[in-house]
Image (cartoon, rainbow, N blue to C red):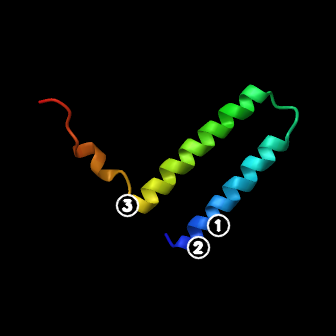
Amino acid sequence: MSLISLVVVLIVVGVLLWAVNQIEQIDPKVKKIINILVIVVVVLWVASQILGGFGNLGTIRIGR
């Protein structure tokens, strides 16, 4: 994915998150949960795009 596409996706996600936060009928606790979930998903997605994915995590062994 190109850098321009990455920036466009981040801008779209930011605008959507801003729009959700502008809705006043949603409980503040629900808004906070939505914000945290979106941020975690976006960070994981960006990391997978930059680092080439998490495909090698299945080969990590813990213990014997």
Question: Identity of the amino acid at label 3?
Answer: Gly
Disc 1 marks which residue? Answer: 8
Question: Identity of the amino acid at label 2?
Answer: Ile
Q: Earlier in the sequence, mark 2 or mark 3?
A: 2
Residue 40 at x, y percent in the picture: 55, 42
Residues under numbered marks 1 and 2 in contact, where contact means CB atoms less than 8 Å apart: yes
Residue in the picture at 70% in, 54% down: 14
Any mark on residue 31, and which? none
Q: Is 52 displayed left or right of 30 in the figure?
A: left
Residue in the picture at 78% in, 29% down: 28
Residue closest to the far left? 64
Residue 50 at x, y percent in the picture: 43, 62
SS for dot 1: helix
Task: Report the Cα–Cα distance between label 2 and label 3.
Answer: 17 Å
SS for dot 3: loop
Task: Report the Cα–Cα distance between label 1 and label 3.
Answer: 19 Å
Q: Is 57 displayed left or right of 51 in the figure?
A: left
- Mark 1, Cα crowd under 10 Å, few <14 / some 14-19 / many 20+, is few
Disc 3 marks which residue? Answer: 52
Q: Is 39 displayed left or right of 1 in the figure?
A: right
Residue in the picture at 16% in, 29% down: 63
Q: Is residue 40 above or below residue 45?
A: above
Q: Is 22 displayed left or right of 60 in the figure?
A: right
Residue 24 at x, y percent in the picture: 88, 35
Residues under numbered marks 2 and 3 in contact, where contact means CB atoms less than 8 Å apart: no
Task: Report the Cα–Cα distance between label 1 and label 2.
Answer: 6 Å
SS for dot 2: helix
Residue 42 at x, y percent in the picture: 56, 50
Q: Is residue 14 above or below residue 26?
A: below
- Mark 3, Cα crowd under 10 Å, few <14 / some 14-19 / many 20+, is few
Counting every numbered tag in the picture gives 3
Any mark on residue 4, and which? 2
